[in-house]
Image: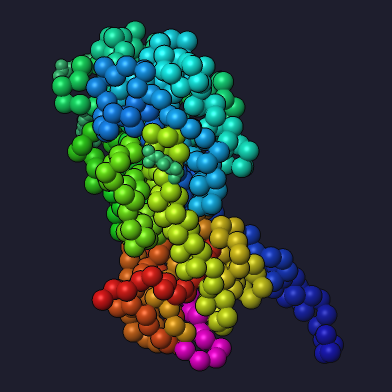
Amino acid sequence: MAKTHNFFPISTLLLLFQSALSWNDQTRVATPPLPIPPLPSYSQLKWQQREIIMFLHFGVNTFTDREWGTGLESPSVFNPTALDANQWADAAAQAGVSLMILTAKHHDGFCLWPSKYTDHSVIGSPWKNGDGDVVREFVEAAKARGIDSGLYLSPWDRHDPRYGHDKLYNEYYLAQLQELLTRYGDVREIWFDGAKGSNAKNMSYYFNDWFSTVRELQSSINIFSDAGPDVRWVGDEKGYAGSTCWSTINATSLSIGNATIISYLNSGDSKGTNWLPAECDVSIRAGWFWHKSQAPKKLSELLDIYYKSVGRNCVLLINVPPNTTGLISKGDVQRLKQFREAIDTIFSSNLAQNCLVEASSQRGGKNGGFEAINTVDDDHMWTYWAPSEKEKGDYWIEFKSRSGKIKFNVIRIQEAIGLGQRVKKHEIYLDGIRVAKGTTIGYKRLHRLEMGVVHGYSVMIKIVKAKGLPLISSVGLHFDPFWNPN
Ligand SMILES: *[C@@H]1O[C@H](CO)[C@@H](O)[C@H](O)[C@H]1NC(C)=O
Ligand SMILES: *[C@@H]1O[C@H](CO)[C@@H](O)[C@H](O)[C@H]1NC(C)=O
Ligand SMILES: *[C@@H]1O[C@H](CO)[C@@H](O)[C@H](O)[C@H]1NC(C)=O
Ligand SMILES: *[C@@H]1O[C@H](CO)[C@@H](O)[C@H](O)[C@H]1NC(C)=O
């Protein structure tokens, strides 16, 4: 502006030309890059952010000390002496759980609610003289604490005589789904599995009709099964996802109760055309139902599961079974509380937040809206670092200490999955030495360093391979006092 030009019209043209080229970079905040499909739905994204959800296996097996009931149990065995669903919900709330799923019916066919279509239910049990409804008490206790409800309705039914007759049993099953999804308010997850004994009667489940019915009756529900359609099984009952774990997979290659697809479920598919993230189910005890002889897993085991489920881009579904009193045993409540306190201890402070943050490049340039500093704010989804479109492949983001060495043993990396899961391979360096490497990141990737605690001045995350531009929404450098690799 200080200089005046003699050739006024030409300089004006030049200025116009320059601003046309650069308006996207400088005049305004840059737009987000295009998404890379498939993308999560609103309900899937909400589900993912729950991180830990709770399963409650409860029914006749609780009283007969079995895992799989025979279907021959009398409803009279179901007799909790002091059932209090508020105690379950308190335990969940204390563990930071926002969704609880109850076994409304397990394989034995006994229904925890007074279904119109069978007398094999709480109607026939001495509990509350046959006037009780565990499902209602469960959803009401959850709701009072702001916790969402989910339900499991076992497809395999060892009691009902209609089982084995395709049309009759599918009608019965649909009738019960209608009861569960219309009587109890909002249900956020419905659980279907393919479990079936080897000499069970042969029959086809009309999954498409079941799924359509669920969609018709509930607007923001996620349907879980081996094959989705919203949430897939992770392929084991240990709570472990694959160390490569894509939320994407080809739904057409999946079927329910098919043992040949277990490793595909465990790792997902980078080329998958469906967004179908994995849920890791595991029990806090050896069994799914409460047994007097069993005790909760150790804290170190639960933390190992956490790193291999939530830390591998999944949601952890942890089962905590009520006992014959109708309460969650004290030891389990205590262990859950310790588990939550340990997670909070590890992740409440992030050493990366005190660092100088730099990156290989930034979309839109400096102040373009996609700075590296976005990886240390409190938003782990919609503010993120994005490199420039011009950059070709050598993507990195670096955290430099402002004073002294950083001491940590856990690295957390999160992708902005709202725009698609992208990272295929990444590496982490401390002062130029590689300390961790991995494949997928997804919503959350946790590396608990094998060598234990490390000290250094600068941590660099290199994105070695990705589908398009990598978008990193959050990074954490944490200290886990419970981790003793030696
Ligand atoms: C089970 O029934 C299906 C049809 O519903 C049939 O195709 C299949 O061969 C049967 N399997 C056995 C083991 O009988
Ligand atoms: C099991 O899955 C494989 C792989 O997708 C498929 O080829 C096979 O037909 C499936 N089997 C059943 C019984 O659905
Ligand atoms: C999944 O589908 C994509 C697109 O059709 C295909 O490229 C990919 O090979 C499929 N994955 C597997 C394991 O078949
Ligand atoms: C069930 O758990 C409650 C709460 O911890 C406890 O008071 C009760 O004794 C337990 N019942 C049994 C049968 O262990």
Residue 393 is inside the magenta segment: yes
Residue 192 is inside the magenta segment: no
Q: Is residue 452 above or below residue 126?
A: below
Magenta residues (range)? 391-405
Q: Is residue 450 above or below residue 93?
A: below
State whether residue 218 appears in this view: no
Q: Picture coordinates of residue 371 (x, y %)?
A: 59, 72
Residue in the picture at 50% in, 41% down: 88
Image quarter (top left, top right, bottom left or bottom right) of the C terminus? bottom left
Residue in the picture at 61% in, 42% down: 145
Image quarter (top left, top right, bottom left or bottom right) of the N terminus? bottom right
State whether residue 67 appears in this view: yes
Question: Which of 56/475 is in front?
Answer: 56
Rendering quarter of residue 440: bottom left
Residue in the picture at 59% in, 32% down: 140
Rendering quarter of residue 376: bottom right
* Render colour scheme: rainbow
* For residue 210, side relative to residue 234 (left or right): right
* For residue 47, side relative to residue 159 (left or right): right
Q: Picture coordinates of residue 122 (x, y %)?
A: 44, 19
Please identify the residue farthest to the bottom as the structure is shown: 404
Residue in the picture at 43% in, 18% down: 126
Question: Which of 442/456 is in front?
Answer: 456
Q: Picture coordinates of residue 254 (x, y %)?
A: 30, 35
